[in-house]
């Protein structure tokens, strides 16, 4: 269902670990949902670990709930931006639930950004080449928009931003 990617940070996990079966609503608070398919996501050890999501589940009056990428469109909550000067790929919250999710899940944590920058810089380069009419670059960018690709949200954002088709 998650194509071997962490549902939150979009990093590939299954080639280096088994990943975590993540309970969107934590089983400690919602034990009745423990085996409910719609409550299960694939999470990486970092997003799902004690430093970040763990058993947290903020309610609406606490800025939550976290964005659920299976039920909701992440672009309703985040901008996916690349700064070509610094080479930094950032997830920018658009509203309170986006802010809570970005902060509590560490979607701009340093080690994640370092890896994401490398991939997204290449995506930005493909988008620029595609805008200049490079059909191969456009095909590569479209491939990178597929659900199984790391940081597909950024590829989709570039495709939209540069009015490619
Ligand atoms: Zn993750």
Image (spheres, helix red, strand yellow):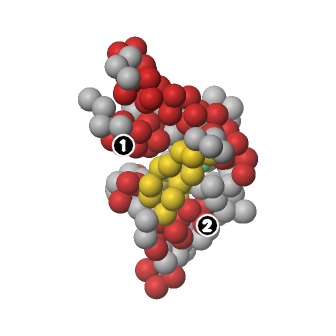
Q: Position of residue 86 (x, y in %)?
A: 66, 45
Q: Quadrant of the N terminus?
A: top left
Tag 1's secondary structure? helix
Instruction: Look at 51% across and 28% down and name the residue there.
Output: 125
Name the outermost residue toward the bottom: 61
The dot on residue 13 is none
Q: Position of residue 139 (x, y in %)?
A: 37, 19
Q: Residue at x 35, y 15 (%)?
A: 135
Can you identify the residue that label 2 sits on? Answer: 104
- Residue denoted by label 1: 161
Q: x%, y% of residue 45?
A: 67, 49
Location of the C terminus (image quadrant): top left
Does dot 2 land on a helix, a strand or a loop? Answer: helix
Which of the two discs, 2 and 1, sits closer to the camera? 1
> Which residue is at the front of the view, 145 or 13?
145
Q: Foreground: 157 or 130?
A: 130
Query: For the point 33% across and 41% down, which residue is it?
Result: 160
* Circle 2 Cα neighbour tier, 10 Å, few/some/many (<14 / 14–19 / ≥20): some
């Amino acid at each position: 269902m998650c194509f071997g990617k962490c549902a939150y940070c979009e990093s590939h996990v299954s080639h280096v670990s088994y990943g975590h079966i993540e309970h969107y609503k934590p089983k400690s608070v919602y034990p009745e949902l423990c085996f409910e398919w719609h409550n299960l996501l694939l999470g990486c050890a970092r997003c799902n670990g004690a430093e970040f999501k763990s058993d947290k589940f903020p309610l609406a009056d606490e800025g939550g709930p976290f964005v659920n990428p299976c039920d909701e469109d992440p672009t309703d909550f985040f901008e996916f931006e690349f700064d070509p000067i610094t080479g930094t790929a950032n997830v920018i919250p658009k509203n309170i639930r986006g802010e809570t999710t970005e902060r509590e899940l560490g979607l701009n944590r340093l080690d994640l950004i370092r890896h994401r920058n490398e991939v997204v810089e290449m995506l930005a380069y493909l988008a620029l080449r595609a805008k200049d009419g490079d059909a191969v670059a456009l095909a590569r960018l479209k491939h990178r928009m597929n659900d199984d690709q790391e940081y597909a949200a950024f590829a989709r954002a570039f495709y939209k931003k540069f009015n490619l088709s």
